[in-house]
Image (cartoon, grey):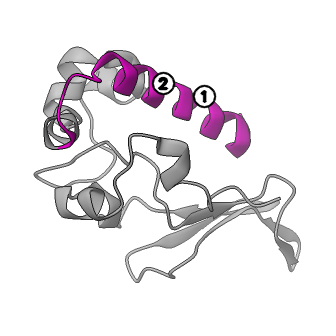
Amino acid sequence: MSYKSWFINHGKKHKEIVDRLEHLSDNELIDYFKFENMVEKEIDFCPLYAKNKKCHNIEDLNCYLCACPNFRFNDNGFKKIENRTLLSRCNINSKDGTQFKSETAIHQNCSGCNIPHSKSYIKKHFSRDWFKIMKNVKTL
């Protein structure tokens, strides 16, 4: 699956949940996206939910920003580095991020970074429109 197709599909799933919960306040909506609640009520939102597994090992994981607004991807690649194509990167060069390198590609590995998963970060960047928050992620 390409980054673009994941991005579009995930944004649609996010919108379906937000639209269904339009009666909730912003704070209630953010709280709804707590990992424990999402595993129970939105099992199809993330493939890891079926295994009750977190993508980030943090106590109060919030999945409202499942993808990070600082993540950048280009399915055609940003540039070549030696014999590999850089397909994704962190726009803020988080010290907790790393790169995964395959034979042909370089991908950003965000599993060690917790930036977008705290309630305070989500509130600071909040919009009920996930695509609005994520507008800079997709690079053409």
Distance CA(mark 1)–CA(mark 2): 6 Å
What residue would you read off at disc 1?
9
Residue 48 location, quadrant: top left
Q: Secondary structure at mark 2?
A: helix
Residue type highlighted by circle 1: Asn
Mark carried by residue 86: none
Q: Main secondary structure of the magenta part?
A: helix
Q: Which mark is residue 13?
A: 2
Q: Residue at x 24, y 35 (%)?
A: 33
Q: Quadrant of the C terminus?
A: bottom right
**Residue closer to the observer: 63 or 58:** 63
Q: Amino acid at mark 2?
A: Lys
- Total marks placed: 2
Classify residue 42 by image quadrant.
top left
Q: Which residues are magenta?
A: 1-26
Residue found 18% across the figure and 18% down from its top: 40
Residue 87 locus on image (x, y percent): 74, 61
Residue 103 place in picture, x, y as percent: 78, 60
Neighbour tally class for label 1: few under 14, some 14-19, many 20 plus, Cα within 10 Å: few
* Magenta span contains residue 64: no
* 35 w.r.t. 108: above or below: above
Indicate the quadrant containing the N terminus: top left, top right, bottom left or bottom right: top right
Is residue 133 found left or right of 52 in the rendered image?
right
Relative horizontal placement of residue 102, taking residue 12 as reference (left or right) = right
Q: Nearer the viewer, residue 57 or 116?
A: 116
Give the quarter of the image for residue 9: top right
Indicate whether residue 4 is drawn in magenta: yes
Q: Residue at x 46, y 58 (%)?
A: 68
Disc 2 residue crowd, few under 14, some 14–19, many 20+, Cα 10 Å: some
Q: Are marks 1 and 2 in contact (CB under 8 Å)?
A: yes
Where in the figure is residue 26, as x and y percent of width and height?
21, 41
